[in-house]
Amino acid sequence: MWEPYHPITYFGHVIAGVIGLAAGLVALSAKKGSPLHIAAGRTFALTMVIAVVTTLIFLFDRERQPLIFILALGAFYLVSSGVLSFRNQKPYAKALERVLIVIPLAIFLYSLFAISRVLVGGSPAQILGPLLFAALFGGLFLGDVRVLRSRPTARVAWVKRHLLRMVLAFGFATMALLRLGLDVGLPLAVTVIVPVVLALLVSLYFTRRVSAGSLEENQPPLAQDAP
């Protein structure tokens, strides 16, 4: 079952992935800021880190696949920056954000390279995935630059940042399950593009609810509000 991987790494990845997806669903459905949401969010973040580490170990045991590497790095970046959104007042927060910003920039540049290769001699349908990743991580990179240059003082801005990144991380986990875990035989466009688009729509729904909610724009973000 686990060949060619080590059984501990294999089952650790599978268990972390299953628990992470379940915790992500609970966090999405629970009242935001409630103890259940916070506990589920912390579980999701921890299990996603375990899944990322085991995925990177897998890369040493099989043929290198760029999509796997992008999913792993992307998920790590999204979870880490999502957690840091509620740790933004900590002394280490800005330093870690300066390190993490390298990841969306690298994925953006690689996506541009992939687009150029498709334009030279690939099928037009192959451009959809790289184009989506270029737009997504290019936007995330610009958002990080803006935050590093001028850190928001409104709590709602950090809540929106947290929601976007954690929901996208759940989308990446779903993408990995459909594309690499279950191998359901669906086209690349369905297993890669649909999870990201749905995650963006869900995050838009939650951020709109935050904007229309009771959060005050001048209320400072609380580090203990979320994972």
Image: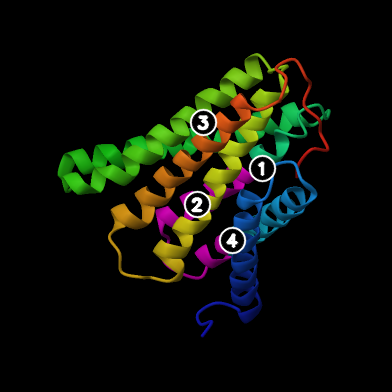
First in sequence, mark 3 or 1: give its number: 1
Q: CA distance from mark 2 to mark 4?
A: 10 Å
The first of marks 3 and 4 along the sequence is: 4
Classify residue 92 by image quadrant. Answer: top right
Which quadrant would the C terminus be assigned to in this image? top right
Q: Secondary structure at mark 2?
A: helix
Region of the chain picked out in magenta, as a range:
55-79
Q: Residue at x 50, y 52 (%)?
A: 172
Residue identified by numbered label 1: 80
Say the numbered circle drawn on residue 21.
Answer: 4
Identify which residue, 215 or 122, lies in the foreground. 215
Question: Looking at the image, is mark 3 or mark 2 earlier in the sequence?
Answer: 3
Disc 1 element: helix
Residue to which mark 2 is pinned: 172
For label 3, the residue is: 140
Query: Which of pointers 3 and 4 indicates the residue nearer the eye?
Result: 4
**Within 10 Å of the Cα at label 1, are there few (<14), some (14-19), or many (20+) other Cα atoms?**
many
Q: How many marks?
A: 4
Q: Nearer the viewer, mark 4 or mark 1?
A: 4
